[in-house]
Image (cartoon, helix red, strand yellow):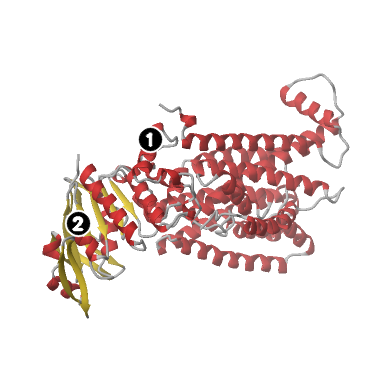
Amino acid sequence: MGLRMSCQQIDFAYEKRSIFREISLEILPGQLYSIVGPNGAGKSTLLKCLSNIYHPKAGMIYLDDRLLTEIDQRNLARILGYVPQKEAASFTISVYEMILLGRRPYINWRVKREDEEIVESILSRLGITHLAERQVDTLSGGERQKVAIARALAQCPEIIFLDEPTANLDMNHQLEVMEILVELAQADKTAVVVVIHDLNLANRYSDKIFLLGREKVYAAGVPEDVLTKENIREVYGVDVDMIDTPHGRYIIPMKK
Amino acid sequence: MVSKSDSMYGRLITKRVVLLVLLLLLLLFGALYSITLGVANISISQVYGVILKTILGLGTEEYPLIVSGIVLKIRLPRVLLAIIAGISLGANGAIMQSILRNPLASPYTLGVSSGAALGAGLTIVLGNHLLNGSLMAQYGSWLTIIGAFVMGLLTIFLINVVASIKGGGVGTLILAGVALSYLFSAGISFLKYIADPEELTELTVWLMGGLYRSEWLDVIILTPILVLGLIFILRLAWDINALNAGEEVATNLGVDVYKLRRRGSILAAILTSCVVAFTGIIGFIGLITPHLCRMIFGNDNRYLLVASGLLGAFILLTADTAARLIINPTELPVGIITSIFGAPFFIYILLQRRRKHWA
């Protein structure tokens, strides 16, 4: 149990505009990783490359010792889960059926009892059983985010990727979502990879942080080694102050 | 352990299956009733007597040739063609909306209807110059059918070629369809301009859509195509469901979105072109039916596609029956009826919907 993802020297470009070059990183089971960096650094793009949505222009991504490109799509969909930044169903759908879509890599035609049980257990785990029959477009932002996470969990993935899961959420829901993710990593040994803008949330919850900047991984490692005044000034162009509190270290932007 | 039908999802599925069966029964009774209606005064017992005797070999009563002829050669194939065309338009409307993620899509969105119309127009107006008079009189209607079918298909291939050059986004597909539609409309206008009065009438009537030319051969050709096509389309149902959550999510769920769009649009175009070739352009059924079904059946395409087909068949059958009866003893092109009732009804469901059935 627990796959290791490693990517070696991957490049990505839109048409001719290079987004990042020669990125190498490793993702281990049971860890929570944050990808941080300024706008346009390629955080979401990197996340999509890792979750098999985009294909890197060069470089290799391995799951254990198998190349990602050599695993068939259905099997990959059982390993890699993805939660987009913004959920947008084109036609309205009930919460239950939206989560059931996560079972698509396992379903041929009929929905089996096992699929139902998995969906039901995820509903109750995330505390949204009461929403099951609601239509997704009637939900609040926080509820919608949980439904999207639930759908990715229904894939029973070994690695789950989330694109800014706390954006547009109030602080209560931000903490709630981050704690769900921590629990996934710790209890289920799922690897969790989030793209996140809030450096304080990243600092507080991550086991490891990838700081993107200048078309590469500018720094990687445990939060205190990566989120330093020097690194942040180099990558974001902002001077910050650090304050140690009983709840951890806080990063406060000072001036440009 | 909870039995399947007691679970939350089980109840939902049971409800949908029950509704589908009801819809099927409605269609069946509608069809049987429609056969009894018509200009010729034939009693209901005679109608069913003829059908039972010929198809099932039951009963001994002899019916006048004119009665059995009207029932078997005119009304029955027409009702069947209405059902076939309705299934195709309804189901293809649903699939086009879903794969293009666009509530305004219909089987005609990508220009299939304009292509088919141009094909039909070419054969109607230019056929006389290609074939001599007697051949044209004998095979002219088949030439039109083939022309419409081929041009309808050619349209979707052209669009997919454009899309493959550009990367296959929805916008590219729809805009390429719009552009081709304008081009083909110009072609049709040109044909109308150069046509002689007789050809012009024939082309105009063809463009309005109707089932008045239906015969058994149409039913025999279309049925296997429809059945096969629907099987292939239903196999895409889960992929189409996944696409509802967005292209990126669908890709992550293992769906090749580009391939799905190509397959879905080509399958829908084959079925649509086949039907349009025989019936002309019947509007609004492919647009409205899927929306009604989305409200009643939800957006699981396994049920939605089937339901849209059945409801499309029922609506077209009703409209065609009305077309036969309204201005007795002649008839209206059914395309006029579906559009007259379809357009206001579409606005009505837009205003009435309590919930957003599309984003």
Q: What residue type is labelled 2?
A: Ser
Task: Residue A18: give its label.
Answer: none
Quadrant hosting residue A45:
bottom left
Task: Residue A117: give its label.
Answer: 1
Residue B332 lies, in percent from the top left, at 79, 53
- Camera-nearest residue between B281 and A185: A185
Residue A95 lies, in percent from the top left, at 45, 47
**Residue B228 located left or right of residue A123:** right
Q: Residues within 10 Å of mark 2 (few under 14, many from 20)?
A: many
Task: Residue A206: give its label.
Answer: 2
Q: What residue type is labelled 1?
A: Glu
Quadrant hosting residue B20:
top right
Residue B354 lies, in percent from the top left, at 59, 54
Q: Name the residue located 66 percent from the left edge and 39 percent from the top edge.
A: B219
Mark earlier in primary sequence (2, 1): 1
Please, which chain is the residue tagged with disc 2 on? A
Residue B121 lies, in percent from the top left, at 67, 59
- Camera-nearest residue between B17 and B33: B17
Reply above or below: B305 against A51.
Answer: above
Quadrant hosting residue A122:
top left
Q: Is residue B11 visible?
A: yes
The residue most toward the left is A225
